[in-house]
Image (tube, rainbow, N blue to C red):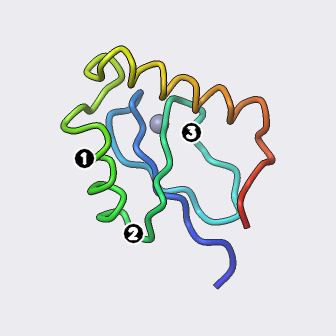
């Protein structure tokens, strides 16, 4: 089985991303990962958290800050991954 895939929503590309387990994410933009086991589940989680927003500018100011903060955390510690 190995490391599970990471399901995320990317607010730069405006679409869902799936990162293969254990691999470096191929997108360095503003994406948010969800605790989901499938792309459908991630989409539901994204809908619940961010509604219909597809791109960063469609989010509320608070949510934009959140997403940018999450991205910042990631670039400071790229090797940090839950196992
Ligand atoms: Zn992306």
Queried on whether the Cβ of the residue with tag 3 lies below 8 angstroms from ligand 1, the answer reads yes
Picture layout, residue 41 above or below residue 24: below
Dot 2 beta carbon under 8 Å from ligand 1: no
Q: Mark 3 or mark 1, which is nearer the start of the sequence? A: 3
Q: Is residue 76 above or below residue 44?
A: above
Determine the image quadrant of residue 3: bottom right
Q: Which mark is residue 12?
A: none
Residue drawn at (46%, 53%) of the image: 34
| On-image quarter of the N terminus | bottom right
CA–CA distance in space, label 2 to label 1: 14 Å
Left or right of 58, for residue 38:
right
Residue at x-position 73% and y-position 67%: 83
Residue 48 x, y percent position in the rendering: 26, 48
Provide the residue designation for mark 3: 27
Q: Residues within 10 Å of mark 2 (few under 14, many from 20)?
A: some
Q: Which mark is drawn over residue 47?
A: 1
Residue 49 percent coordinates (x, y)? 32, 42
Q: Is residue 68 left or right of residue 25?
A: left
Compared with 50, 62 (above or below) is above
Q: Residue 38 at what x, y percent from top left?
A: 39, 69
Q: Nearer the viewer, residue 25 or 53?
A: 53
Q: Nearer the viewer, mark 2 or mark 1?
A: 1
Residue visible at 18% across and 37% down? 52
Q: Residues within 10 Å of mark 1 (few under 14, many from 20)?
A: few
Q: Judging from the image, what secondary structure is the residue with disc 3 in?
A: loop
- The residue located at (58%, 25%) in the rendering is 69
Circle 3: is it few (<14), some (14-19), or many (20+) Cα within 10 Å? few
Left or right: 69, with 55 as reference point: right
Identify the secondary structure beneath mark 1: helix
Task: Point out the tag, 2 or 1, that comes first from the N-terminus.
Answer: 2
């Amino acid at each position: 089985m190995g490391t599970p895939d990471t399901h995320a929503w990317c607010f730069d590309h405006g679409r869902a991303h799936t990162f293969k387990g254990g691999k470096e994410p191929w997108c360095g933009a503003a994406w948010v990962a969800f605790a989901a086991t499938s792309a459908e589940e991630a989409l539901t989680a994204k809908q619940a958290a961010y509604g219909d927003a597809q791109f960063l500018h469609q989010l509320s100011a608070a949510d934009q800050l959140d997403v940018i903060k999450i991205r910042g955390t990631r670039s400071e510690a790229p090797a940090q991954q839950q196992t």
